[in-house]
Amino acid sequence: MKNGKAVVLVVEDSTIIRMSAVDLVLSAGYEALEACDADEAIGILESRDDIDLVFTDVQMPGTMDGIKLSHYIRDRWPPVRLIVASGEAILEESSLPTGSRFFSKPYDSHAITDAMAHLLSIQNKTGC
């Protein structure tokens, strides 16, 4: 959170769902970035040092799904918080990196924004 506004990267292959998630992030008062798959998301993460949270779908085309992406992000960028959503896979949060949150689609907008606020407040308290 460089300018007092958290930066959230939305990773979703469906354009309509991605636009809706970006609107949700913006309405919660955060800066929103977007990627259509894991490869694009990694490129954005490599080019910026201000991403606080990644909100990703599980099922995506490309080299990795949202589960693999979340583990890759946790290993490479440990301070980045993670929210994973899926309309098909009902995941146990234990299959995700520690501290991640999982939501089934269709998800409740308030539940997502509450989770974002909670994860970002943890990040701020730890000074990461």
Image: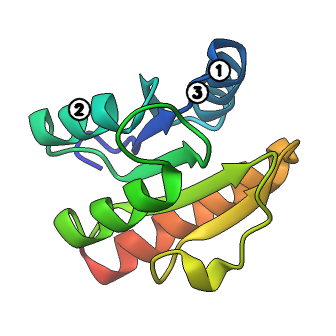
Q: Does residue 13 sit above or below 7 in this rendering?
A: above
The residue tagged 1 is: 14
Depth check, mark 3 against mark 1: the one in front is: 1
Going by the numbered disc 3, the residue's amino acid type is Leu
Q: Does residue 28 sit above or below 90 in this rendering?
A: above
| Crowd tier of the residue under label 3, counting other residues whose Cα lies within 10 Å: few below 14, some 14–19, many 20 or above | some
Question: Is the Cβ of the residue at disc 1 closer than 8 Å to that at disc 2?
Answer: no
Residue drawn at (72%, 70%) of the image: 91
Identify the element where label 1 is drawn. loop
How far across and down, in percent of the image, does residue 18 sit? Answer: 62, 23
The residue tagged 3 is: 26
Residue drawn at (63%, 69%) of the image: 101
The residue tagged 2 is: 44
Residue 19 appears left or right of 90:
left
Q: Does residue 124 sit above or below 103 in this rendering?
A: below
How far across and down, in percent of the image, does residue 124 sit? Answer: 36, 70
Rendered image: mark on residue 3: none
Going by the numbered disc 1, the residue's amino acid type is Ser
| Crowd tier of the residue under label 2, counting other residues whose Cα lies within 10 Å: few below 14, some 14–19, many 20 or above | some
Task: Measure how far apart labels 1 and 2 are at the Cα level.
Answer: 18 Å
- The earlier-in-sequence mark between 3 and 1 is 1
